[in-house]
Image (cartoon, rainbow, N blue to C red):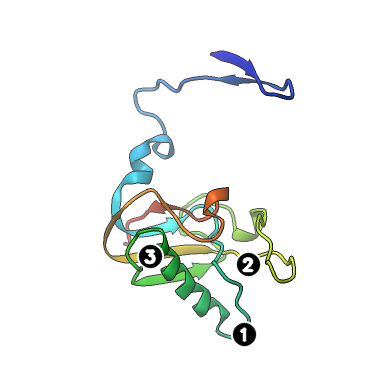
Amino acid sequence: MTRTSLLNDTDFAVELDARERPPINLDPHTWTACFRTWASVTPVVPNRHFDGKDRWERAADSVKDACRHIGLPRSAEVVLHPVSVVEGVPHAREFPRLLLRKRDNGRQSHAHAVIVFDRPVTGPVLVGAGRFRGCGLCKPVDPR
């Protein structure tokens, strides 16, 4: 175990996980696998804010475009929902809203997503406006 401190003199401990079989979520292959279907474990923030009855359909289309924007193929299907299909992930409203809208400083909408591609995609997959702040992190899932 290594003890160190941050700039503000807060001590913390770092310990290397040397277990022969670490938990699956600590295995890098979990996040870098090659799958067609990916589900968010942190909510996705669409690149734009949408109003109106069809706002969630338009937001899903913007997530498809966001995939293309980061070098992935445009996804074939995106389903947005407040609850992740990944077991144990909190409801979207339980995550802090990290981004504000430019036009009025309102909080950006966010939701969990299931993203389906036409062909397998190699991770890691982080999509949407908050990807540099930890939003939109996806885990490969078996669609069954």
* Cα separation between marks 2 and 3: 21 Å
* Cα separation between marks 1 and 3: 25 Å
Q: Earlier in the sequence, mark 1 or mark 2?
A: 1
In the image shown, does 19 or 75 lie closer to the viewer?
A: 75
- List x then y, in percent, for residue 54: 55, 84
Residue at image mark 3: 68
Report if the CB atoms under discs 1 and 3 are less than 8 Å apart: no
Dot 1: what SS? loop
User: Local crowd at mark 2 within 10 Å, few (<14), some, or many (≥20)?
Assistant: many
The answer to whether residue 84 is above or below residue 124 is below
- List x then y, in percent, for residue 20: 34, 23
Please, what is the three-letter code of the amino acid marked with disc 3?
Arg
Q: Quadrant of residue 5?
A: top right
Of labels 2 and 3, the one closer to you: 3
- List x then y, in percent, for residue 39: 43, 58
The disc placed on residue 109 is: 2
Judge left or right: residue 5 versus residue 32.
Answer: right
Please, what is the three-letter code of the amino acid marked with disc 2?
Ser
Q: Quadrant of residue 67?
A: bottom left
The answer to whether residue 61 is above or below residue 54 is above
Judge left or right: residue 96 versus residue 115.
Answer: right
User: Local crowd at mark 3 within 10 Å, few (<14), some, or many (≥20)?
Assistant: some
The disc placed on residue 52 is: 1
Q: Quadrant of residue 98?
A: bottom right
- For the C terminus, the quadrant is bottom left
User: Local crowd at mark 1 within 10 Å, few (<14), some, or many (≥20)?
Assistant: few
| Residue at screen point 60% across, 14% down | 3
| Residue at screen point 43% across, 39% down | 25
* Cα separation between marks 1 and 2: 13 Å
The disc placed on residue 71 is: none
